[in-house]
Image (cartoon, rainbow, N blue to C red):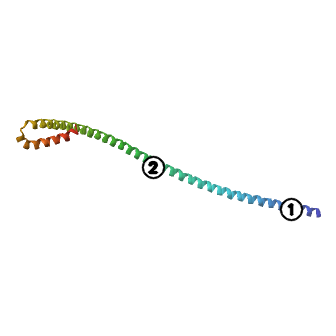
Amino acid sequence: MEFWKGKAKKEEEKAAHAMIELRKKNAEYETITVEFETSQSERQELRRKIRYLENMLQSCQQQLDTLLNALEEKNDQHDRDTRTYERALQEKEMQLGFLINEIRKAAMQVVQLSNEAEALSCQFPPSQRSSISEFLERVKKQGNVARKFV
């Protein structure tokens, strides 16, 4: 009997030791299960965040495309406006050139008239020069001004 008691006690100790090991393994299993569930939750949260960021990125991409299209349209309009202004400027320059030439022609005529007036002033007798000389002096002054444009 003593033998069986010793054997039973050993078996009991083995069973207690196995039970302790089983409880340790069970605790490890529960810890790993909790970690796995936490990991799964974190993965799901990360997937949700990734979808959110992808949607944000797509929205930003669409906004950029819209802005780029608007910028291209404004750029095209600016180019059209610039060409229109350049043509208008060329027309104004041509008109200005024409007017300058007309002014030069008129100035040359005034200079010519001034020269003729000076020649005429010498042909009048001194008694008649006073009334005509005022007019001729004004013509000379205009001629001097006109010489600056010739």
The quadrant in which the N terminus is found is: bottom right
Q: Indicate the secondary structure of the residue bearing disc 2.
A: helix
Query: In the rendered image, which quarter is residue 27 located in?
Result: bottom right
Q: Point out the tag, 1 or 2, that comes first from the N-terminus.
A: 1
Mark 1 or 2, closer to the camera:
2
Callout 1 secondary element: helix
Instruction: Point out which mark residue 63 bears.
Output: 2
Q: Quadrant of residue 76?
A: top left
Q: Position of residue 87 (x, y in %)?
A: 29, 39
Q: Badge 2: how crowded within 10 Å, few (<14), some, or many (20+)? A: few
Determine the CA span between mark 1 and mark 2. 74 Å
In the picture, measured across the screen, residue 75 lies left or right of residue 6, that is left
Question: Could one spot residue 1 in this view of the protein?
Answer: no
Residue 18: image x %, image y %? 82, 59
- Check residue 13 in the rendering and tell me which mark sits there, or answer none: 1
In percent of the image, x 15 and y 40: which residue is there?
Answer: 140
**Tag 1: residue type?**
Glu
